[in-house]
């Protein structure tokens, strides 16, 4: 799901057991890179989020560390 909020584009992904998902941030980072490249949206205007019925996590992919986005 993509949402426009506060001048940013937020890529959102429902993940059952969101608080235990270890690859959600990495997956969303790659979605953000692709969206920025294809749609010519400035990377600093994109946010990534994943959620379920109980939890919501959001981050700025531009500020993500290499450790966060490294595939295991």
Image (cartoon, helix red, strand yellow):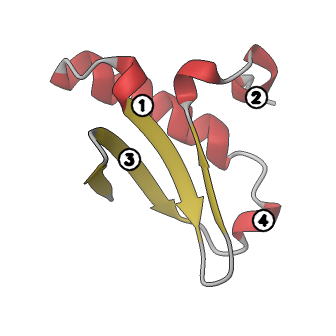
First of labels 4, 1 by sequence position = 4
Which element type, helix, strand or loop, lies under badge 3? strand
Query: Could you tell me how many numbered marks the image carries?
Result: 4
Of marks 4 and 3, the one in the foreground: 3
Residue labelled with disc 4: 19
Could you classify mark 4 by the number of other residues whose Cα lies within 10 Å: few (under 14), some (14-19), or many (20 or more)? some
- Mark identifier at residue 10: 3
Q: Earlier in the sequence, mark 4 or mark 3?
A: 3
Q: Is residue 1 left or right of residue 13?
A: left
Mark 1 or 3: in front is 3
The picture places residue 2, in percent across and down from the top left corner, at 29, 53
| 60 on left or right of 44 | right
Mark closest to the chain's N terminus, 1 or 2 = 1
Query: Tag 1's secondary structure?
Result: helix
Q: Residue furthest bottom?
A: 53
Cα–Cα gap, marks 4 and 3:
19 Å
- For label 2, the SS is helix
Q: Is residue 42 left or right of residue 62?
A: left
- Residue that numbered label 2 is attached to: 68
For label 4, the SS is helix
Q: CA distance from mark 1 to mark 3?
A: 9 Å
Badge number at residue 32: 1
Give whichever of discs 2 and 4 has the lower sequence position. 4
Q: CA distance from mark 4 to mark 1?
A: 20 Å
Using the numbered discs, state the Cα–Cα distance from disc 2 to disc 4 in whole angstroms. Answer: 15 Å
Mark closer to the observer (3, 2):
3
Answer with the quarter of the image where residue 45 lies. top left
Mark closest to the chain's N terminus, 3 or 2: 3
Which residue does the image show at 53% across and 52% down from the upper left? 49
Q: Residue furthest front?
A: 6
């Amino acid at each position: 799901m993509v949402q426009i909020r506060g001048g940013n584009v937020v890529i959102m992904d429902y993940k059952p057991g969101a608080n235990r998902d270890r690859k959600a941030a990495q997956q969303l980072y790659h979605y953000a890179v692709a969206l920025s490249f294809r749609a010519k949206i400035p990377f600093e205007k994109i946010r990534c989020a994943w959620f379920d019925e109980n939890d919501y996590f959001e981050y700025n992919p531009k500020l993500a560390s290499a450790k966060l986005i490294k595939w295991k």
